[in-house]
Amino acid sequence: MSDVVGYEVEGRIAVLTIDNPPVNALGLAVREGIVARMEQAAGDDAADAIVLIGAGRTFPAGADIREFDQPARDPHLVAVIDRLDGIEKPIVAAIHGTALGGGLELTLGCHFRVASPDARVGLPEINLGIFPGAAGTQRLPRVASLDHALELIVSGRPIGAARALEYGIVDTVVEGDLRAGAIAFAEKILADRMNRRISSEPRAGIGSEDEFADVIQKYRDLANQRFRGQESPHQAIESVIDGLRMPYEDAVAADRTRFEACKNSDQSKALRYAFFAEREAAKIPDIGKEVTPREIGSTAVIGAGTMGRGIAISLADSGLSVTVVEAGQEALDSGMAELEKLYDGMVARGRIDEATKKERLGRITGAVDYAATSDVDLVIEAAFEDLDVKKGIFAQLDQVAKPGAILATNTSYLDIDAIAAQTSRPEDVIGLHYFVPANVMRMLEVVRADKSAPDAVATGMALAKRTGKVGVLARVCHGFIANRSRAPLVREATFLVEEGAAPAQVDKVLTDLGMPLGPLAVSDMSGLDVSWRMRQSLAGERDPEARYMYLADRMCELGRFGIKAGQGWYAYEDGGRRPLPDGDVEAIAADVAREQGITRREISDEEIRARCLYGAINEGAKIVDEGIAARASDIDVMWLYGFGYPRWHGGIMFTADEIGLAEIYEQVKAFHGEHGKLWEPSPLLERLAAEGGGFTR
Ligand code: 3H9
């Protein structure tokens, strides 16, 4: 009998417990176990009703995603769920934790559902490029309204127990011990002689597309807005529509074919890869679970500029107290006023209410003296991006911070080893590179300096999780993982404009790949002067043999700093933010090209794609080779959350593997010949291309 599904009889109730850590995923053994135990309960004279519950932290959180790469094995989850319809004894699903995907579908096969108050239920399949493939698209609309069913299916977002009760997905919410509550509920069903509720009934179709046209359109619009370029939400809607007009069996059969096509699609493979890459990124190869992160309760942020304010909000929103330190009272007052405005904006948009704003803002205090940081567990410096400024701040922090406090710098490219060297405790120094706006962007690049202590690094990663961010660990180099791997994309974009492409052409190639904005539009938003200053500060280290970004410099010399200046790679009218093509840019590019002896030409979209993408991939390979990233998939996670790379393409390194490394290597070599030193092929790329290997597989 099954090891992973336990069987006990309590009173007249058989209790089946699924025990397959960590999340009770519905792999083959669990599916077989459920069928075997259900048959056992059906034939057990000592049992009149059945409770199905999960051991550990959750009811099954879905099908076992790892099985999707293997041939399907019977019993299929649909068959397991359909079998429950025929069991004459009432079955109660007892839900705690997260009943997701196949887990929720399994509960729909049960005749009743009870849940803990903090349980969550949902159908997140579309995030994996599939849709609920175990009859959820047929059963949920029969249990909840079509609107609510489509909400769960198309948004992919789970809902809490209270909402599930409101939608009719659960029958009752059980306070206290769930197992006991579910048994009591089953006893009540028997006492009240309640009929089993079978969610595949009525067996005939349940409506017509016309009847529900408005609801369907609402979710088609949602799919287009939120999942631009992604196929599975549309397939999910088609599957629900099938169920309106076809009998249950026929709709399930149609689902099966549609589901297999989705599962085998490139989009689903990439999305599944992204799911596991994200979880892998949380693991630090040489820092195991035995290393405990330090306790963080109170924090301080140095600097009340855009970055500092965003960081302070992110910390305060996660329940941490924050002291914001500025150099003078005036700067502090204006920073704090801006900070309050950000909260006001959230209230105005209905994201939070006034009481929540007060509570969160109440956790943030201001100070003009570093002494205010003397008691806190974590200090994050978010000052101007200048090595000397940062060194000075760390020397001061060293004087006042309490022993064991984490001293973090929010630099995006500077040498953290040099910053740590200003303190007597480099083991407490790490990098925490936030992305703008820091309270919104989910990416957090945690940088491990040469002397960072393992528990300091673990604290940075734990902070990411606690503040709802995705932490990716990097080692120190110029630009770390994020900015170093992205730099070639921006560099090539500007070179291509110099050589004859229009900014809009370059950007369009990248947005056609699925990126939300092209690199030149992004530069206009963040300000061309930011990287100009960086290039100036690095002028002494410039390699005279490498091609230089003369055009980007010229744009800045002409005051074309981007949106804030009303002109950059594009023109902006009347203080607006809509990029408009600007003929002056072409003239400026032509001047610079002439000075540099570059003959301008027509540039193909294909060349733009290859130069921008392969430049980043080649740099990514160097980053892995040098150990700056622990693994190639960490670079991908960074691009997904930091730069809006389309999740259904997995990330740049995954894309490289899909294209084939031999092809990329040949192209990089060719660009090296044409454009020189910046295209030096990565030795790792060269080796993997020769071996027929991949970065991510
Ligand atoms: C589906 O159900 C299809 C059906 O409609 C049709 C079928 C025919 N499978 O995230 P965590 C692993 S599709 C395999 O760190 P948390 C995860 O990799 C599925 N493994 O924990 C990690 O492993 P490791 C629909 C899974 O507490 C460990 O569990 N369901 C699965 O932060 C812990 O995970 C979903 O899409 C899985 N389904 O979050 C839900 N789930 O320790 C996907 C997790 O080796 N899962 N693992 O790195 C989640 O959203 C989160 O894991 C969850 C817990 C919220 C459950």
Image (cartoon, rainbow, N blue to C red):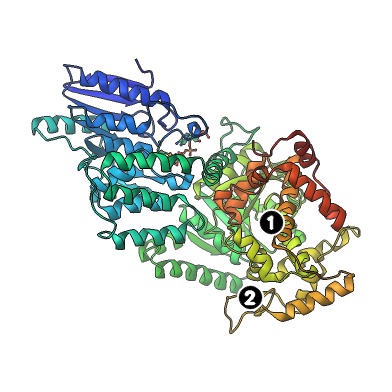
Residue farthest along the bottom direction in this orientation = 574
Judge by depth and name the residue closer to the eye, 288 or 157: 157
Q: Provide the residue designation for mark 1.
A: 412
Which quarter of the image is occupied by the N terminus? top left
Three-letter code for the amino acid on which mark 1 is drawn: Ser
User: Disc 2 designates what residue?
Assistant: 563
Confirm if mark 2 falls within 8 A of ligand 1.
Answer: no
The answer to whether residue 584 of the structure is visible from this angle is yes
Q: Say if 237 sits above or below 452 in the image.
A: below
Decide if residue 302 is in sight here: no
Classify 10 Å Cα crowding around label 1: few (below 14), some (14-19), many (20 and above). many
Give 429 or 519, whichever is nearer the viewer: 519
Amino acid carrying mark 2 in the image:
Ile
Q: Nearer the viewer, residue 27 or 467?
A: 27
Residue furthest left as drawn: 192
- Give me the C-alpha separation between circle 2 and circle 1: 22 Å
Residue reaching furthest top? 1
Question: Would you place residue 90 above or below residue 670 in this image?
Answer: above
Mark 1 lies on a secondary structure that is loop
